[in-house]
Image: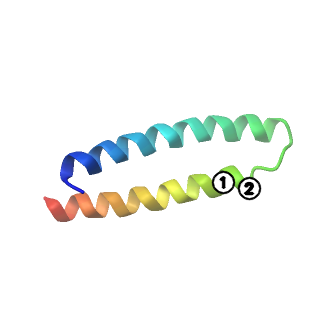
Amino acid sequence: MDKKQIEERIAELKADYIRLQGDLEKIESLGKNVAPTERQLAAIEEELRTLRKQLAELK
């Protein structure tokens, strides 16, 4: 991936992360199982770490 693609992917992941946080709050308030959503958030966090590392290496 080039720098622009990495930055675009980071922006997409940030938007997904924000959406999932809102979903998590709704799910919690309903007393439902939040584990799947928490796993998705953790996966996004890991991908963001990886992409930020790649971006830093390009600079």
When asked about the image quadrant of residue 53, the answer is bottom left
Percent across and percent down for residue 6 are: 28, 51
Which quadrant of the figure contains the N terminus? bottom left
Q: Residue furthest left?
A: 59
Q: Which residue is mark 2?
A: 35
Q: Residue furthest front?
A: 1
Left or right placement of residue 49 versus residue 28 in this view = left
In the rendered view, tell whether residue 39 sits above or below residue 5. below
Residue at the image position 26 percent from the left and 48 percent from the top: 5
- Residue drawn at the location 52% of the way across and 43% of the way down: 17
Q: Position of residue 57 (x, y in %)?
A: 19, 65
- In-image side of 28 versus 43 (left or right): right
Under circle 2, the secondary element is helix
Give the residue at x 21% y 61%: 56
Screen quadrant of the C terminus? bottom left
Work out how far the residue at label 2 is from the one at label 1, CA to CA, in angstroms.
5 Å
- The spot of residue 31 in percent (x, y) is 86, 42
- In the rendered structure, the answer to whether residue 44 lies left or right of residue 22 reads left
Mark 1 burial class by Cα count in 10 Å: few <14, some 14-19, many 20+: some
Disc 1 marks a residue whose amino acid type is Glu
Give the residue displayed 27% in from the left and 46% down from the top.
Answer: 7
User: Helix, strand, or loop for circle 1?
Assistant: helix
Task: Assess whether mark 1 and mark 2 are in contact (beta carbons under 8 angstroms).
Answer: yes
Amino acid under disc 2:
Ala
Q: Which residue is mark 1?
A: 38
Q: Quadrant of residue 51?
A: bottom left
Label 2 crowd (10 A; few <14 / some 14-19 / many >=20): few
